[in-house]
Amino acid sequence: MPQQTISSGPQQAPTPTVFVLFGATGDLSRRMVLPAFYDLFCRGLTPPEWVLVGNGRGADADQDFAERVRASLEEFGPGSDKIDDKQWKDFSDRLRFAGGGFDETDPGSLLDVIGEAADGIGDGAQYVHYLAVPPVAFGEVVAGLAAHDLLKNAKVVFEKPYGTSLQSFTELDEQVHSVMKEEQVFRIDHFLGKEATQNLHVLRFGNAMINKIWSADAVAQVQIDAPEPLDVAQRAEFYDATGAFKDMIATHLFQVAAEVAMDPPASIAPDDLQDAREQVLAAFRPLDPSEVVFGQFDGYTDIDKITDDSTTDTLAAVRLWVDTDRWRGVPFVLRSGKRMAGDDQLVSLIMRETQGPLGDLDDAAARLEISLKGSGSIAVALIMKRPGPDLTLREERIDLSLGEVSGGEALDPYVALIHDVLLGDRSLFTSSAGLADAWRVAEPVLADPPEPLPYEPDGWGPKQAEALTDGLGWMTERE
Ligand SMILES: NC(=O)C1=CN([C@@H]2O[C@H](COP(=O)(O)OP(=O)(O)OC[C@H]3O[C@@H](n4cnc5c(N)ncnc54)[C@H](OP(=O)(O)O)[C@@H]3O)[C@@H](O)[C@H]2O)C=CC1
Ligand SMILES: O=C1O[C@H](COP(=O)(O)O)[C@@H](O)[C@H](O)[C@H]1O
């Protein structure tokens, strides 16, 4: 079978769309959402009729907004030399800006602008309201959408974090569900949109030899490790209020753990995939704070806007237990930190030791690794005989970069996810029940966070985090 397409539906969204981007002047819009929308447009994946309305509290004219968008494409999109004049003209003709903010009592100019925009693109337009605003503004935008009757034939996209604890999640979700149905809600976790994350299902369910080893019978430990060299000075206020545990572990890495640990869904249809993810999240055991290590890199509190006594975690490592028949007894160890020596997002399934004629072999030598970073890669590390007259064993890797798979072209996660929103495919979005479980699992750590241990910038973090791997060490540090 050289190639087989299993399509779950049409590629181009057929419905005329008014895409309202709240927070259109912000960092996320500039770096991710606007370039992703332009990418979809260039690929012919936007609906035949659409208009994008940026919203903000200032008073930009349409032309000013178009200039902002252009600047964002030059810096974070294809770059100035790759923007085709004709394509840009077609794109920019469909950009509008509605200033004056938006809330329950005052919609600013948004109602007028989208009224005009909807008239221009024909009957039956769907509305996509994309909330690229700080989480504190989610509630007021939701209240505004309800008060100004903007939720009919509408989808609402929420950026992360959707809540920061079980309680704040529950309050937000109750407000959301009081004015819209769950089917209208698209909660983004861009790790679910990564090409390699999506490949986890195919790798496993499309290959019997991999499917057979996907359980406690063969796997001794699962590691999901995302060391980052990044500093946090650019977003100090946000980061100091959030920390590594909430920014990465309880959000992205829990969702990836659910993707790895899920039992086979009934089918790859969106609802079945969501059900499978929800079911396994419900089986995650609440974390035990004694199996959690927090770190803070030296010099963190010298950063502008960080207080001298900040105890924010810039690194978090946890041991998570999944109480299902498939995974009972197998530790899932998760780690992420800033200012680290490595730069990866690596899922490692470490195989059990082989008892046999070769005797004692290096632990963790045989493993399957899926890197979610960039366009993604899949590797198998195996024990091999070094060619030659003697029997010398060595660990070798077989690597496949997904970016090099012939005929394919990886989509950036935001491109993939916005495309899914336009089509109404919710399989790669988090669900209400799934997030409630993620916050339930995180709760003991939020209630009793460990003291962060100091670590050297550009190193591998505190030694104590390594103990969570039961002596195997972190696989990212082997490469
Ligand atoms: N930036 C990133 O890399 C990532 C961000 N996110 C999430 O995306 C969302 C937006 O983040 P980001 O773009 O960084 O944030 P910004 O601080 O850049 O804010 C986005 C825009 O929202 C508007 N805004 C700010 N405060 C308010 C408010 N109180 N009420 C209404 N509008 C407001 C501002 O526009 P104006 O002044 O024009 O009204 C601002 O430009 C957040 O939920 C964040 O957690 C998620 C992943 C990565
Ligand atoms: O959401 C976040 O993700 C990034 C890592 O994402 P990626 O796009 O590099 O895969 C992380 O650096 C950031 O702290 C976090 O807020």
Image: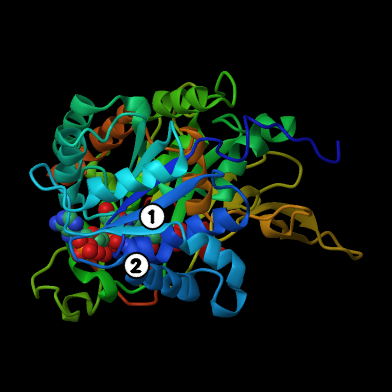
Q: On the picture, is 281 further left or further right than 215? A: left
| Image: 362 above or below 228 | above
Q: Quadrant of ligand 2?
A: bottom left
Q: Which residue lies at the image location 26% right of the left edge and 68% below the top edge?
A: 60
Q: Which residue lies at the image location 44% right of the left edge and 33% below the top edge?
A: 123
Res 312 → quadrant = bottom left
Give the number of the disc on residue 95.
Answer: none
Q: Position of residue 12 (x, y in %)?
A: 60, 40
Q: Amino acid at mark 1?
A: Arg
Quadrant where the C terminus is found in the figure = bottom right
The mark lying in front, picked from 1 and 2, is: 2
Decide if residue 316 is in sight here.
Answer: no
Quadrant where the N terminus is found in the figure = top right
| Image: 175 above or below 77 | above
Q: Position of residue 208 (x, y in %)?
A: 73, 29
Q: Give the camera-side residue of 289 and 29.
A: 29
Q: Position of residue 398 (x, y in %)?
A: 74, 56
CB under 8 Å between discs 1 and 2: no
Q: Give the camera-side residue of 275 and 397.
A: 275
Q: On the picture, is 327 further left or further right than 362? A: left
Q: Give the camera-side residue of 407 and 248.
A: 407
Q: Which residue is mark 1?
A: 335
Element carrying mark 1: strand
Element carrying mark 2: helix
| Image: 187 above or below 236 | above
Label 2, residues with CA under 10 Å away: few <14, some 14-19, many ≥20: many
Q: Residue furthest top?
A: 266
Give the number of the disc on residue 65.
Answer: 2
